[in-house]
């Protein structure tokens, strides 16, 4: 194996390999020191897709010192202009806008002055844009999910391995404060040997996201018309991968998925817009709630709920259980045998979070913690930018990115086959057996 190849492999395997990297790149510089360091070498990032999420990411990005945004792209020129104005308002040079059609992002990616690209376009653009970004030699941060077909997942892995350019799905819930404290607790053995996890993405997105203000399907709503699957599995799975050593000691073996009937969308529009509204009458493929059960090679199970079209408050319902006890996010509680004060009674999670708080969060200021999604977006982009600056692996690697995303096509197959088991592909090609955990090791 030549040196270039091993460097390529190293960058692709991401944070899991970084623990063994002599430069110790994942040992984060304390956050208060980073502005001076960042001034020394600005990281130049192009942003593709500056709608709701992309513009939010851009704002967070601009709050980091040592970041320049020389280029923004959106098929909607008004949005590219708005993004350019936001960059200028931050005191930076006005970026060049790219709005000459759906393929114009390629001109942005061909620029030789960009270190990285962030992609926040509709789902069916993610994988091809990420592939093109890696081929153009740019570090890639791509919004969730990274891919929506099995073929796209493999193309991402193959391109990452061939080019050696890191690509990370921007799964922000992997960086949540509570989830990282739970990761520390698991690594410190508090829950014993892990056997089971539950997670959910329960988020009523009909009125505000899948449909526009007239009740017509936006691009996301079109997916509900034609697909029946867990179409948004990554927010549920983000923390679960590291809690359960997925891709580094264990791996998904197979899954089964079951969908309820589809009532919620029609009912919503019947009540809000009347029975004659097209969205009240249209047939939707997407069942209201999809329940997926994953069996891992170690013999553990993960239940994933997708629930995005019935009226309800937001909820992730993370629960992880081991031989000594369990953590329950919805109850904000923990129970640990022989440790919790009363046998078989919950105790609050808050003191555990305090004690096992991850170093990344201990080092964040109140101001940073107040940024997008309770500080997780700030932390995620801070780590992304730092990896780009150091030319080191990204905190979430390509294997973790696709293993979260592949739930969509696999759940669709299982539902189509009457909830039959569907084998999960091994994107690591067997390396999960020997890879060591690498995410958030500096706890
Ligand atoms: N991680 C999170 O918390 C989070 C939150 C919201 C959305 N998202 C993800 O972000 C992505 C974008 O969602 P959104 O809510 O911002 O949608 P949006 O529709 O508001 O924005 C998408 C933008 O992409 C542009 N676009 C479409 N095709 C393009 C192309 N070929 N080239 C350039 N621009 C193109 C659109 O004009 C639009 O401005 C989705 O993948 C979504 O899942 C993630």
Image (cartoon, rainbow, N blue to C red):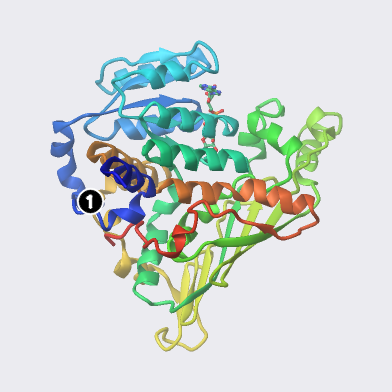
Return the x and y of residue 237 as percentages of the image width and height: 52, 55
Locate residue 93 relative to residue 380 in the image: left or right.
left
Q: Position of residue 322 (x, y in %)?
A: 49, 77
Residue at the spot x=46%, y=87% of the render? 342
144, 424: nearer the viewer: 424
Number of marks present in the image shown: 1
Q: In the rendered image of this protein, does residue 26 appear above or below residue 3?
A: below
Q: Can residue 320 be seen in this view?
A: yes
Image quadrant where residue 8 sits? top left
- Taking the spot 59% from the left edge, 62% from the top edge, the residue there is 253
Q: In this view, does 339 lie above or below 438?
A: below
Name which quarter of the figure residue 217 lies in: top right
Residue 336, above or below 318? below
Whether label 1 lies within 8 Å of ligand 1 gets the answer no
Q: Is residue 288 left or right of residue 109?
A: right
Q: Classify the position of the C terminus by image quarter.
A: bottom left
Count neighbours of disc 1 (C-alpha within 10 A) and say few if under 14, some if 14 to 19, many if 20 or more: some
Q: Position of residue 278 (x, y in %)?
A: 81, 28
In this view, the residue in front, 168 or 310, is 168
In the displayed structure, does residue 25 sit left or right of residue 149?
left
- Taking the image as drawn, is residue 230 in sight? no
Image quadrant of residue 178? bottom left
User: Residue at position x 26%, y 44% from top?
Assistant: 3
Residue under numbered circle 1: 28
Q: In this view, does 300 lie above or below 375?
A: below
Q: Where is residue 263 in the image (x, y as percent from the top left)?
A: 80, 46
In the structure shown, which secondary structural element does the residue marked by tag 1 occupy?
loop
Identity of the residue furthest to the front in this view: 1
Q: 54 and 47: which one is in front?
A: 47
Q: Name the side, left or right, on which 412 lies relative to 191.
A: right
Q: Which of 428 and 122 is in front in this view?
A: 428
């Amino acid at each position: 194996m030549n040196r270039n190849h091993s460097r390529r492999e190293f960058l692709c395997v991401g944070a899991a390999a970084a623990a063994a990297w002599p430069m110790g790149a994942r040992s984060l510089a304390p956050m208060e020191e980073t502005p001076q360091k960042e001034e020394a070498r600005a990281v130049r990032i192009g942003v593709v897709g500056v709608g709701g999420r992309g513009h939010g990411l851009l704002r967070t990005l601009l709050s980091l010192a040592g970041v320049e945004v020389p280029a923004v792209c959106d098929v909607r020129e008004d949005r590219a202009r708005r993004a350019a104005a936001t960059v200028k308002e931050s005191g930076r040079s006005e970026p060049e806008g790219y709005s000459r059609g759906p393929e114009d992002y390629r001109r942005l990616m061909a620029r030789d002055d960009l270190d990285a690209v962030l992609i926040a376009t509709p789902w069916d653009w993610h994988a091809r844009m990420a592939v093109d970004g890696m081929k153009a030699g740019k570090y890639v941060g791509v919004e969730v999910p990274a891919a929506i077909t099995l073929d796209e997942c493999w193309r991402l892995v193959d391109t990452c391995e061939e080019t050696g350019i890191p690509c990370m799905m921007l799964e922000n819930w992997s960086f949540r404060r509570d989830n990282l404290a739970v990761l520390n607790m698991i690594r410190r053995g508090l829950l014993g040997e892990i056997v089971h996890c539950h997670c959910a993405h329960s988020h009523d997105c009909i009125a505000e996201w899948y449909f526009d203000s007239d009740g017509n399907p936006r691009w996301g709503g079109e997916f509900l018309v034609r697909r029946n699957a867990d179409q948004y599995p990554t927010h549920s799975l983000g923390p679960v991968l590291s809690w359960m050593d997925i891709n580094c000691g264990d791996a998904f073996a197979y899954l089964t998925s079951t969908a309820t009937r589809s009532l919620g969308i029609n009912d919503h529009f019947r009540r809000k817009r009347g029975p004659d509204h097209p969205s009240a009458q249209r047939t939707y493929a997407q069942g209201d709630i999809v329940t997926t059960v994953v069996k891992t090679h170690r013999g553990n199970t993960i239940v994933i709920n997708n629930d995005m079209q019935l009226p309800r408050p937001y909820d992730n319902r993370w629960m992880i259980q081991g031989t000594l006890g369990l953590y329950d996010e919805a109850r904000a509680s923990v129970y640990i045998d022989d440790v919790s004060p009363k046998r078989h009674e919950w105790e609050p999670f808050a003191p555990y979070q305090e004690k096992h708080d991850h170093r990344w969060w201990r080092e964040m200021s109140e101001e940073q913690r107040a940024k997008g999604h309770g500080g997780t977006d700030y932390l995620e982009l801070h780590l992304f930018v730092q990896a780009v600056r150091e030319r080191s692996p990204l905190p979430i690697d390509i294997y973790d990115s696709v293993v979260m995303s592949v739930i969509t096509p696999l759940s669709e197959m299982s539902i189509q086959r009457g909830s039959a088991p569907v084998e999960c592909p091994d994107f690591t090609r067997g390396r999960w057996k020997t890879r060591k955990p690498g995410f958030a090791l500096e706890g």
